[in-house]
Each structure stands twice: as structure tokens, then as C-alpha cells.
């Protein structure tokens, strides 16, 4: 057999258990695909030897029987996850050469389940961006192409999205602070779920905005997302915000039966200037869920408009605090100092050299909104608005809504470099449909549902009740089945 | 309010990021664009609304007040740009 890298997790699991393939064969095919795909810029640190060792261990475990679902599954890991002994740089120069002495809880859980790490995946620097263009490694590229332009795979988990869409792994980890799993998933025609805040431990994931960050799987199908999310989830004493709530068997909840479910369509997501193709996609998705037996309900989330401005206070504020640790003392880059330079010059030069432009800008915006005299006007006001945004969702869920259907992104993937001259706010608008979910701590999933007139993938987002990822995944499964999205990018790389 | 180059310089200083003099006007302009966007929040009536502290209403877990970690000096120093004799080394801090 060949092209085993194109398998889904579910199919690979079944074939591994039936001894039709080995983890070593699966891994070898992925490694071959990775080496032929450097043009995509998806993998930034390859770990082929480690992967083959892990594959051998997985095969032994499979032979002994009683292996978990994820045993023998080759994955790509976003560079934001600390992986023991393997470069973990958050796509930043300031963490050049950093090799953690420890493993993040989520990646450890995946290793404990028998998965294989193929390497580390490209991303926006410190997960700040929507196009993977702020990466210190250079751009990640979308495997989807319609003309001679290179398109963005989205961001910040752009390397993860590119790798999954191009079959350079069976699935990948992502993280999502304002849309960083769901937007790239939509841009590349794959599935990405951000679980409820607290479902996955944040320990060992390089922090951006701690009250918003969540890890999640990026996969080829909804079923794979269900399988992988279960392996990533669970309480961790090392993250005080991780929830001590039982993790259900999400896959077992995929019945495809959504009869009688109430799906909310929020009128505030119908933005001015929304492209016709997004409007059309949303209408089609609504019809698919109605045809599957769901009840469609018009709802209102009145504070939606204020989510992005609130996010661009809260996220930079938390980032300015979290990124204060990069001081050139304990890890990563330290600037070369001139004679007579003291510790302040060391900090200032190190941070100026180490952080890219967007990261510097967000740290400074965060510093400003937290500074004396502005804390109440900006930071506290944003946290009040955040409470209102969460209340909007609480109210519709209390009224019986099971899930909310929205577009995932305001457009299809755009060309790399096309946003360079735009003001920063134009790039921020990419997250207009996803950022509310982070502010409210809810689970959200992006499901590929169609192609635009140019042939690029588009996704819809479903938003669920807190801790009800199983129900959300089932609704996503019904949408996936109805949409029947099977398109793949034509290989050009 | 509008950010001028003096405020931009002060913010850069507070953030401990060196910004060269000639880069300050562009930085101030970017701040103004972003803060202009954020100003929309002033339209919202937040009277009587408490600032959110935790997105999930949970009580943080407690643990026994005992030492549960330590003796990892080598690991802690492993990634330091300059470590000497079991310590992080930095430029002179006090005259």
C-alpha cells in the first residue's frame, strides 16, 4: 500500500487494529510526504527519527492488544506546544534554540495514547496573526491554489492546517485564542474544534492570552476531531483553570441524528458588506440542518459588534503580561550588548531583536491599556463588555438553543502578502465570527461545507453549549454528512 | 485620546522594547488606529456590569501546602543564554 498519509484517524485505527498496516508504514508514508512538501512551509522542525522510534513502540503496543484509539497515529504538533528535547519556539526569534526540559500536558496525553510526533508545525509568532505571515520561520502556504499566487492557510495554526489539508500527517494539534483553529481550518477545507475553555490543559503551551487560549484538534473529518479531542482532554492539576469534569466518549455520540435540535441563526452575524458567497453558504448550511430535522430559530446576540474591540484590549493586555518573561535571562535569545550596557539595555535590545513587529505592537498596546490612568477606561471596560457578550450566549442557550450556526470566516483564503499594506485592524477582522466564542469560553467547530466560485474551500462554524462538545460534534457530523465536502487540493508542491 | 510620539516612547519604555526615534511616528499612528477601533467600546452601556474575572464559574482547586517540586537546577538553567556556577548571569544591576 502507499499514500497511507491520506488516511483518516478512524480508518487508520481500524486498519492498525486489523493488522492491515503498521504504525511504521503509516509514519514512513507521512515522512515521505513531508519531505516532498517543503514548499508549503508547514513543518518547521522535523523529527523523523523520534517518529520512527515512537512508531515502533506503537506497533509493539498494538501487537500486545488493548491499544487506545490514537495508538499508532502520526500527528503534527503546533510549535506553540512545549515538546521535551525538541525545539519549541512559538515561531519567534526570541525563543531561538529553546528545547524544553518538559512536555506539555496535551502533547504528553497524546504520547501516552500512543501517537507519533512527526515534527513541529509553523504558526504566527506567539499565535498572533491570521495568516501565518508573522512567523519567524517564514510563511506557511495553503495547499489550495487557483492561480499563480500563493495563498495563506490562515492563522495562527496555519502550519497545522496546511499539513492536514496536504496529508502531511493524519491530524494536527492547534490552539485557538480568537479563531486560530477555526479560521485556518475553514481556509484549507478541514475540521477544527476549539473546545470549552478548561477542557484541555494549557500547561506547557506557550501562553498568549491565558483567559482565551485553548488547544484543540485539526483533522480531516468530524469523527477524527471527536476521537482526537477525547485524547487531548481532561483535568490537569498543573493548570488551575482546567476543569475537573469527566471526558465523555465523543465518538460514541456521533449518531447524525439532530431531529428536534434547535439551531440559532444570529442576525448580528449578517455583517455589512458580507460577500454573497458567504451569505449563500450560510443559507445552504441552514437548509441542510433544517432538512436533517433541526428546528431553525432566528436569534439575537446584541453585543456581537463589540467582541473584536473587547478582544483587542483583553488579548494584548494578557499578552503584555505573559510575554514579560522573555527578558534574555532564562531562555532563548539575548542581544549582544555594547560596552557599558546594563540590565535595562539588555531587556530592551533583546526584546526589540527577538519579537517581530506584530508581537511588539500587541505587547505595547497591552502595556498601554493596563497603564495607570487607562486601566479602567480600557481594560475594565473591555472585561465588562466581555461579561455582556457571554450573557448574550447564556440567554439564548437558556431559551433552549442547542447550537448556533454562523460563517467561520468573512472570506475564502487570501493571497500571501495581500494584507501587508493594510492597517492592522483589517487583518483583525478575519476573526469577526470566531472571537466571540473565545470571549464566552464556548466550544466552536469549523466544518468545511463548500467551495466558492473560484474553487476555494469555505467553512461554517457551529457554536455549542459549554461542556457539550459531544452534542456539538454530533451536529457538526450531521452538517458534514449533508454537505458531503470531499474536495482536496490538487498537488502542485 | 490621541497618541503622540512622546506617549509612544513612554509605552515602549514601559514594555522594555527599544524603539528607535525615527520609528516612533509610525508606531504612534498604529496605536491610534488600534485605539480608534477600541473606542467603540464606549458605546456600550456597562452600568452595573461586573468585569469578568473567570469565563467559567469555577472555584479554583486547592492543594496541600507542601513542597512538590524542586532539585532541578540543571534543567532550569539548561536553556539560559548565560548560566554560571549554578546561577543565571546578567549584566551588573547595581553600581
Image (cartoon, coloured by chain):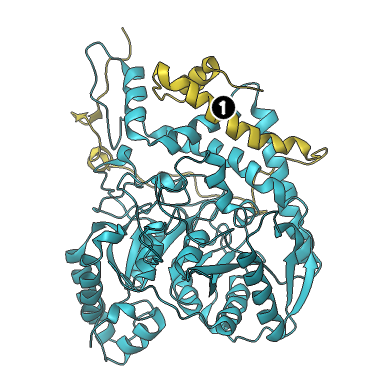
Chain colours: A cyan, B yellow
Q: Residue A146 at what x, y percent from top left?
A: 41, 66
Q: In the image shown, does A256 or A309 lie closer to the viewer?
A: A309
Residue under pointer 1: A368
Q: In the image shown, does B90 or A137 lie closer to the viewer?
A: A137
Describe residue A5's horizontal placement relative to residue A446 as left or right.
Answer: left
Identity of the residue drawn at 51% across and 21% down: B8
Q: In the image shown, does A366 or A165 lie closer to the viewer?
A: A165
Q: Which residue is at the far top?
A: B95
Element carrying mark 1: helix
In the picture, residue A98 is in which quadrant? top left
User: The N terminus of chain A is located in which quarter?
Assistant: bottom left
Describe residue A431's horizontal placement relative to residue B43 as left or right.
Answer: left
Q: Residue B91 at what x, y percent from top left?
A: 27, 18
Describe residue B11's horizontal placement relative to residue A298 as left or right.
Answer: left
Q: Does the image show residue A132?
A: yes
Q: Residue A424 at what x, y percent from top left?
A: 52, 40
User: The C terminus of chain A is located in which quarter?
Assistant: bottom left
Above/below status of A12 relative to A20? above
Identity of the residue drawn at 36% across and 18% down: A344
Identity of the residue drawn at 25% across and 79% down: A26
In the picture, residue A48 is in which quadrant? bottom left
Above/below status of A8 relative to B50? below
Above/below status of A289 relative to A136? below
Q: Does the image show residue B61?
A: no
Q: How many marks?
A: 1
Q: What chain is tagged by disc 1?
A: A
Q: Residue A230 at what x, y percent from top left?
A: 48, 72
Give the crowd class for mark 1: few <14, some 14-19, many >=20 residues within 10 Å.
Answer: many
Above/below status of A303 relative to A56? above
Amino acid at each position: 500500500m502507499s499514500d497511507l498519509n491520506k488516511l483518516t484517524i478512524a480508518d487508520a485505527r481500524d486498519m492498525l487494529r486489523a493488522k492491515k498496516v503498521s504504525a511504521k508504514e503509516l509514519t514512513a508514508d507521512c515522512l515521505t510526504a513531508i519531505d516532498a512538501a517543503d514548499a508549503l512551509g508547514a513543518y518547521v522542525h522535523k523529527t523523523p527519527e523520534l517518529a520512527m522510534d515512537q512508531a515502533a513502540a506503537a506497533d509493539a503496543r498494538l501487537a500486545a492488544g488493548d491499544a487506545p484509539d490514537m495508538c499508532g497515529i502520526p500527528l503534527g504538533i503546533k510549535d506553540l506546544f512545549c515538546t521535551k528535547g525538541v525545539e519549541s519556539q512559538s515561531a519567534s526569534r526570541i525563543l531561538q534554540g529553546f528545547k524544553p526540559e518538559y512536555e506539555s500536558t496535551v502533547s504528553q496525553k497524546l504520547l501516552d495514547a500512543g501517537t507519533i510526533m512527526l515534527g513541529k508545525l509553523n504558526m504566527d509568532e506567539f499565535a498572533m496573526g491570521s495568516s501565518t505571515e508573522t512567523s519567524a520561520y517564514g510563511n506557511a502556504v495553503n495547499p489550495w491554489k487557483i492561480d499563480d499566487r500563493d495563498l495563506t492557510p490562515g492563522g495562527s495554526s496555519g502550519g497545522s492546517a496546511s499539513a492536514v489539508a496536504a496529508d502531511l500527517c493524519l491530524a494536527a494539534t492547534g490552539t485557538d485564542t480568537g479563531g486560530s483553529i477555526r479560521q485556518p481550518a475553514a481556509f484549507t477545507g478541514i475540521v477544527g474544534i476549539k473546545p470549552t475553555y478548561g477542557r484541555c490543559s494549557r500547561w506547557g503551551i506557550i501562553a498568549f492570552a491565558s483567559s482565551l487560549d485553548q488547544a484543540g484538534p485539526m483533522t480531516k473529518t468530524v469523527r477524527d476531531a471527536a476521537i482526537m479531542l477525547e485524547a487531548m482532554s481532561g483535568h490537569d492539576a498543573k493548570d488551575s483553570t482546567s476543569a475537573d469534569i469527566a471526558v465523555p466518549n465523543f465518538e460514541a455520540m456521533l449518531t447524525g441524528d439532530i431531529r428536534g435540535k434547535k439551531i440559532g441563526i444570529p442576525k448580528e452575524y449578517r455583517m455589512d458588506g458580507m460577500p454573497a458567497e458567504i451569505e449563500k453558504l450560510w443559507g445552504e448550511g441552514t437548509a441542510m440542518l433544517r432538512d436533517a430535522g433541526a428546528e431553525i430559530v432566528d436569534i439575537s446576540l446584541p453585543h456581537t459588534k463589540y467582541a473584536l474591540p473587547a478582544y483587542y484590549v483583553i488579548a494584548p493586555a494578557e499578552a503584555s503580561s505573559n510575554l514579560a518573561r522573555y527578558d534574555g535571562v532564562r531562555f532563548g535569545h539575548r542581544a549582544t550588548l555594547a560596552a557599558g550596557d546594563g540590565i535595562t539595555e539588555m531587556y530592551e535590545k533583546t526584546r526589540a531583536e527577538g519579537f517581530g513587529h506584530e508581537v511588539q505592537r500587541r505587547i505595547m498596546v497591552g502595556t498601554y491599556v493596563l497603564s495607570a490612568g487607562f486601566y479602567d477606561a480600557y481594560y475594565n471596560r473591555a472585561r465588562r463588555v466581555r461579561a455582556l457578550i457571554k450573557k448574550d450566549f447564556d440567554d439564548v442557550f437558556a431559551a433552549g438553543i442547542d447550537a448556533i450556526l454562523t460563517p467561520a470566516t468573512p472570506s475564502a483564503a487570501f493571497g500571501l502578502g495581500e494584507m501587508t499594506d493594510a492597517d492592522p485592524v483589517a487583518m483583525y477582522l478575519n476573526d469577526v465570527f470566531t472571537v466571540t466564542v473565545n470571549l464566552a469560553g464556548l466550544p466552536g467547530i469549523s466544518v468545511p461545507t463548500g467551495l466558492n466560485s473560484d474553487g476555494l474551500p469555505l467553512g461554517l462554524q457551529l457554536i455549542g453549549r459549554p461542556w457539550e462538545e459531544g452534542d456539538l460534534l454530533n451536529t457538526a457530523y450531521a452538517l458534514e454528512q449533508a454537505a458531503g465536502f470531499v474536495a482536496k487540493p490538487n498537488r502542485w508542491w | 485620546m490621541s497618541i503622540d510620539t512622546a506617549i509612544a516612547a513612554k509605552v515602549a519604555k514601559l514594555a522594555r522594547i527599544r524603539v528607535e526615534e525615527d520609528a516612533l511616528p509610525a508606531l504612534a499612528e498604529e496605536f491610534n488606529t488600534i485605539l480608534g477601533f477600541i473606542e467603540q467600546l464606549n458605546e456600550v452601556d456597562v452600568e452595573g456590569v461586573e468585569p469578568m474575572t473567570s469565563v467559567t464559574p469555577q472555584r479554583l482547586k486547592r492543594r496541600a501546602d507542601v513542597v512538590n517540586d524542586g532539585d532541578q537546577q540543571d534543567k532550569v538553567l539548561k536553556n539560559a543564554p548565560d548560566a554560571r556556577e549554578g546561577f543565571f548571569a546578567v549584566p551588573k544591576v547595581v553600581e
